[in-house]
Amino acid sequence: MFYTNSKREISYFGFEDGEEIKRKHPDPSKAIQSLNDLFGLLLKAWSKETAYPSSQKDPNFNIDNDPTYGQCAITATLVYDLFGGSIHKVNVSGGGTHYFNRINGGYIDLTSDQFSLYGIPLSYEPNQEISREYCGKNPNTLKRYKLLVKSVADEIARME
């Protein structure tokens, strides 16, 4: 079970047990061996600063209750870097784009809660596979990705 800072139960879309997915490269710290390990760290590492710029400006944004809001592109990139697979995107009703992963034939979306929390329908098909390089093209996205990686590393260091 996972909980937000506001003590709301939270989960992600994909394999029932994140243990099924193996890391692309061994983790010397042993802190991230599964998607569940990563998700637990992300719940502490996501911040307003790592969110998409329009999410940061949203007056209703509450990082303690909705930590996945605006975090999809950088999170999908981090999942790809750690676990492999591919990155995909879909257009969302009302505008916008959402990013997630496909690993071992199944879709994984560590930021799906931003839609389920508000009852916003999200369909993973049809989708477009995108390259890892595409996710780093935008300077703001790259900056937020690097901040997220640092925040995850800081969380791991706090655990040791």
Image (cartoon, rainbow, N blue to C red):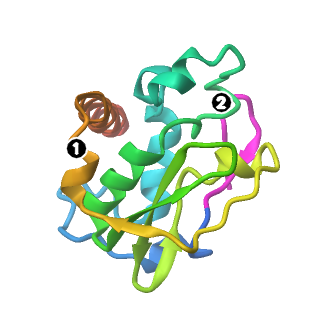
Q: Is residue 71 left or right of residue 112?
A: left
Name the quadrant containing residue 144: top left
Q: State whether residue 135 is above or below residue 156.
A: below
Measure how far apart labels 1 and 2 are at the Cα level.
29 Å
From the viewer's side, name the closer residue of 65 and 157.
65
Q: Position of residue 80 (x, y in %)?
A: 30, 62
Three-letter amino acid code at disc 1?
Gly
* Number of marks in the rendered image: 2
Q: Position of residue 132 (x, y in %)?
A: 23, 58
Region of the chain picked out in magenta, as a range: 1-12
The mark nearer the N terminus, 1 or 2, is: 2
Secondary structure of the residue carrying tag 2 is loop
Q: Position of residue 133 (x, y in %)?
A: 18, 53
Three-letter amino acid code at disc 2?
Asn
Q: Which mark is residue 92?
A: none
User: Which residue is under mark 2?
Assistant: 5
Secondary structure mostly seen in the magenta stretch: loop
User: Which residue is under mark 1?
Assistant: 136
Residue at the right extreme, as displayed: 119
From the viewer's side, name the closer residue of 91 and 122.
91
Q: State whether residue 98 is above or below residue 47.
A: below
Taking the spot 48% from the left edge, 26% from the top edge, the residue there is 47
Which quadrant does the N terminus fall into? Answer: bottom right
Taking the spot 46% from the left edge, 80% from the top edge, the residue there is 20
Taking the spot 72% from the left edge, 19% from the top edge, the residue there is 60
Taking the spot 77% from the left edge, 45% from the top edge, the residue there is 117
Q: State whether residue 116 is above or below residue 24.
A: above
Tell me whether circle 1 and circle 2 mark residues in contact (CB < 8 Å): no
Within-10-Å neighbours for mark 1: few <14, some 14–19, many 20+ = some
Q: State whether residue 6 is above or below residue 22.
A: above
